[in-house]
């Protein structure tokens, strides 16, 4: 195996719309399929680094494919040194700003770089980062549920060993939230962590009222009760909340987390690899979380998140919401409620027959 740093030979992106095993309903709508962009970074050492990003809506798929490939075209020939490449991207997009599709493209490329480096070294990304793969406690992530209609699915999660379940709130009034939380808590019993995610659907006053009403049900955290950019609103809700406040999936790059931590916006953080700066950004945020003694969980991207959580000093929970399983040759496998990173690299390999089935032009 060559010891030289691999260089980028080409970058390819493909849009797929994949089926979901169960729909994900939140306060603003419902996901029945998963719009993903698959990224392949081919190197001069014959290895291809892979990653995927979640487009949230079909309408953003083509712009993301275009951005990834156009950015990648300018990177051909450059060595894969993720920290230097991220600095170059920061300089390139500083005046434009990179919160949004550009940031998603940059983060997706960063994940693919690390996958390529791991493959070239014959190691997992967790090992490249100085750690080793280990079982990370995972929670099963649901949308809005009905404790009666969805009882079979919820019990199946328990049978898989999950020690945490997350549901969505805010899709109805406070009465509905309490009905659902009460029913799910009764079903799960007292020993399973139960989280609720409001997806930024409340104002601070309403969030405070609902949190107080749900307090008797021993919730593990309240997630994104108010708009993600409203750091003062988050801090205000947190100040009186008897339940820990979780946030961070929509905070951008390490700077966004520095500002949120400084504002006291949440008790817990959960960076999204597609928005926080990929693996390179995640590691910088992990240092902030350690310094502030803030537990750090993941958002989506379970396969890659298992690697970075393995080297995160304040690692808390891995979110398991399986968007990519249907197009992976080796889907992520939950064992006794945990997920262990696989490799080499990030352990991602496309099931090309499935990709061909779900790819869109």
Image (cartoon, rainbow, N blue to C red):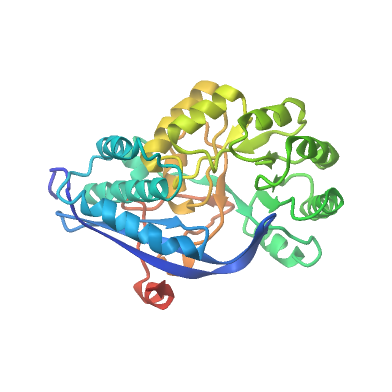
Which quadrant of the figure has residue 31?
Answer: bottom right
From the viewer's side, name the closer residue of 97 and 277: 97
Against 149, is 344 above or below? above
Q: What residue is drawn where x is 37% and y is 76%?
A: 356
Q: What residue is drawn where x is 35% and y is 53%?
A: 343
The x, y position of residue 256, in whole percent, is 49, 32
Relative to 167, 307 lies left or right = left
The x, y position of residue 62, in whole percent, is 39, 64
From the viewer's side, name the closer residue of 122 and 247: 247
Relative to 115, 323 lies left or right = right
- The answer to whether residue 12 is visible is yes
The x, y position of residue 58, in whole percent, is 49, 65
Q: What residue is drawn where x is 29% and y is 48%?
A: 113
From the viewer's side, name the closer residue of 199 and 345: 199
The x, y position of residue 209, in whole percent, is 83, 37
Against 63, is 103 above or below? above
Residue reaching furthest to the front? 95
* The C terminus sits in image quarter: bottom left
Relative to 120, 133 lies left or right = right
Relative to 181, 316 lies left or right = left
- The answer to whether residue 293 is visible is no
Against 97, is 181 above or below? below
Q: How many marks?
A: 0
Which quadrant of the figure has residue 41?
Answer: bottom left
């Amino acid at each position: 195996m060559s010891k030289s740093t691999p260089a980028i030979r080409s970058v390819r992106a493909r849009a797929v719309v994949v089926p979901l095993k169960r729909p994900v309903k939140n306060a603003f709508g419902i996901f029945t399929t998963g719009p993903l962009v698959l990224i392949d970074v081919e190197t001069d050492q014959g290895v291809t680094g892979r990653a995927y990003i979640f487009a949230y809506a079909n309408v953003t798929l083509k712009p993301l494919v275009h951005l990834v490939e156009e950015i990648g075209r300018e990177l051909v020939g450059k060595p894969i040194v993720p920290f230097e490449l991220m600095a170059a991207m920061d300089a390139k997009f500083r005046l434009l700003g990179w919160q949004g599709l550009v940031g998603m493209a940059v983060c997706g490329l960063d994940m693919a770089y690390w996958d390529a480096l791991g493959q070239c070294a014959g190691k997992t990304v967790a090992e490249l980062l100085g750690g080793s793969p280990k079982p990370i406690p995972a929670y099963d992530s649901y949308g809005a549920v009905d404790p009666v209609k969805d009882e079979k699915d919820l019990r199946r999660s328990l049978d898989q060993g999950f020690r945490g379940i997350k549901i969505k709130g805010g899709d109805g009034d406070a009465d509905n939230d309490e009905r659902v939380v009460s029913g799910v808590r009764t079903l799960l019993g007292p020993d399973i962590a139960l989280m609720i995610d409001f997806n930024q659907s409340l104002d601070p006053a309403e969030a405070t009222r609902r949190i107080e009403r749900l307090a008797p049900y021993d919730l593990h955290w309240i997630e994104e009760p108010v708009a993600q950019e409203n750091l003062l609103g988050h801090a205000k809700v947190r100040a009186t909340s008897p339940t820990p406040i979780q946030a961070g999936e929509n905070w951008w790059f390490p700077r966004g987390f520095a500002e949120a931590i400084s504002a006291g916006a949440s008790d817990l953080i959960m960076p999204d690899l597609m928005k926080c700066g990929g693996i390179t950004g995640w590691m910088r945020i992990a240092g902030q979380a350690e310094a502030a003694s803030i537990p750090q969980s993941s958002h989506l991207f379970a396969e890659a998140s298992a690697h970075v959580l393995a080297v995160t000093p304040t690692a808390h929970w891995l979110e398991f919401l399986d968007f990519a399983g249907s197009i992976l040759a080796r889907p992520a496998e939950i064992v006794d409620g945990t997920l262990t990173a696989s490799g080499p690299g990030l352990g991602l390999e496309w099931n090309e027959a499935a990709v061909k089935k779900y790819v869109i032009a």
